[in-house]
Image (cartoon, coloured by chain):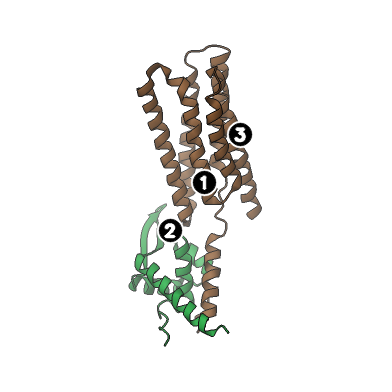
Chain colours: A brown, B green
Amino acid sequence: MVEQDFNPQQSLELIETMINRAKDKFAERGDMYLIWGWNVFICSIIQFILLHFFQYPYHYMVWMASWPVFFYQLYQLRKKNKQRKVRTYTDHIIAFVWVTFLVLIFLLAFLIGRLTGGEYYSHINPVVLALYGMPIFLSGIILRFRPLILGGIGCWVLSVLCTFIKEYDYQFLMIPLAMIIAWIIPGYLLRARYKSQQ
Amino acid sequence: MFKELDPILHSQLRLAVMSLLISVKQAEFIFIKEKTNATAGNLSVQVQKLKEAGYIDVIKEFKDNYPNTSCKITKKGIAAFEEYVKTLQEYLQVKQP
């Protein structure tokens, strides 16, 4: 860039160009949606099978499989942070939307456990679904990505539908359904959008 | 009578740096260099001037054992940038028929 005198019109053009350049290729790759979408999808299907067909009392143990996925994601995030040359406000806000979600999900699991005692499992699914909708919907708004917005709303609809399912085994099937509409489909669409920008 | 344009911002490279930094939270020196197509020498002189004016913060840290410089706009910088754009608009409004 050569230093020279420039008029107000050129100043404004320069500002506009630089702001647009800062926005280049900041797209979300959708990895996190796919990793977690498939993880939760598979775990919840296995949990349903263990519960419904085998009446296995420790059906929830299947969720232990999330720990390796969690550590894998931490590793990926660290790697991504090292490669990243710029931190945008969008990244910052979305990161904290997910932090809020994680805090709330652990908090609600604890609170519902404390408040309902034995009734724990018959209440957890609608609440978890309602909560799943929040980070997805907000991410959709922040990234201006309609499939995520619709996925978030879909989770909220499923959470209401869930309360009408009397046999609570079947409530567990709402979770994989939510994963497909809110995480897996938007995840693949995000990945496609990211690749098309490269 | 027109207000004078802030001389610190009314320079192509410094304005380019400020426009980049106003749209992100924090950017590495190398990122700014790529986006502005400036030479490292020229860019560090201009970054230093913006820092002395209190418009940006320069953060020096280590990344994989190598020194790494990042820049971030300050509140004073945001106010100066807004004022600069406002003055530009005044200039352009009068010029328009």
Q: Residues within 10 Å of mark 1 (few under 14, many from 20)?
A: many
The residue at 48%/13% (across/down) is A57
- Name the one closer to the observer, B34 or A113: A113
Which residue type does callout 3 highlight? Ile
Q: Secondary structure at mark 3?
A: helix
Report in which chain the residue with disc 3 lies. Answer: A
Marks 1 & 3 on one chain: yes
Residue with the mark numbered 1: A139
Where on the picture, by quarter, is residue A180?
top right
> In the rendering, which numbered label is found on residue B25?
2
Q: CA distance from mark 1 to mark 3?
A: 17 Å
Q: CA distance from mark 2 to mark 1?
A: 18 Å
In the picture, which quadrant includes the C terminus of chain A? bottom right
Residue with the mark numbered 3: A180
Q: Secondary structure at mark 1?
A: helix
User: Measured from the top left, where is residue B64 in percent x and y?
Assistant: 42, 52
Which residue type does callout 1 highlight? Ser
Q: Residues within 10 Å of mark 3 (few under 14, many from 20)?
A: some
Marks 2 & 1 on one chain: no
> In the rendering, which numbered label is found on residue B64?
none
User: Measured from the top left, where is residue B9 in percent x and y?
Assistant: 43, 76
Q: Is residue A191 left or right of residue B26?
A: right
Report in which chain the residue with disc 1 lies. Answer: A
Does residue A103 sit above or below A173 in this rendering? below
Q: Earlier in the sequence, mark 1 or mark 3?
A: 1
